[in-house]
Amino acid sequence: MKKINSHELENLVTLIKEFMIDRSSNNKNFKELLAIYESCYLNFYPDLSKDLRINTYVQDMKNKKWNQEIIPEMKNGQITDGIHRGIAYLKCIKEGIYEKELPEVYLKTL
């Protein structure tokens, strides 16, 4: 595992092509997923994919209830696990929480 910072996390490509209201066919990186999330999470119902769990993750991280590291898993050059947690982490930073106050992020390559 390799420790990474928020800038490295932003640019990691995920296996997600369609997310929330976005139906484009390209794989999204974390920065793109955060932008999509922020543009539509207030009006996103029904939440069949449980994407709104990001809200809970953000609150837990802000309130220091998140006690574990964030470990996105990469396989074949794409993040396959830890995507919602990564989005929540970046949202916290965008809202003014310093990285040093958040859980550490480690990239795990499978």
Image (cartoon, rainbow, N blue to C red):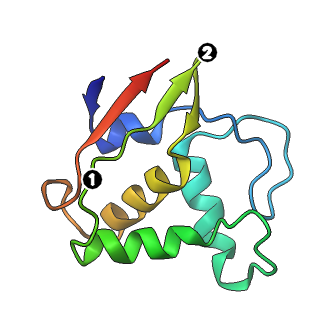
Q: What element does badge 2 sit on? A: loop
- Seen at 85% across and 38% down, the residue is 25
Looking at the picture, which amino acid does disc 2 mark? Asn
Could you say which disc has been placed on residue 96 in the image?
Answer: none
Mark 2 vs 1, N-terminal side:
1
Badge 1 density bin: few <14, some 14–19, many ≥20, Cα 10 Å: few
- Estimate the x, y position of residue 17 in percent, counting from the top left: 77, 41
Query: Where is residue 30 shown, x and y percent of the image?
Result: 53, 45
- Which-is-in-front pick, marks 2 and 1? 1
Helix, strand or loop status at disc 1: loop
Q: Is residue 68 left or right of residue 40?
A: left
- The disc placed on residue 68 is 1
Three-letter residue code for mark 1: Gln
Q: Is residue 26 left or right of residue 81?
A: right
Q: Residue at x 38, y 39 (%)?
A: 71
Q: CA distance from mark 2 to mark 1?
A: 25 Å
Return the residue nearer the eye: 42 or 64: 64
Residue 47 rendering spot, x and y as whole percentages: 76, 74
Indicate the quadrant where residue 13 lies. Answer: top right
Q: Identify the residue shown where x is 73% and y is 84%.
A: 43
Q: Tag on residue 76?
A: 2
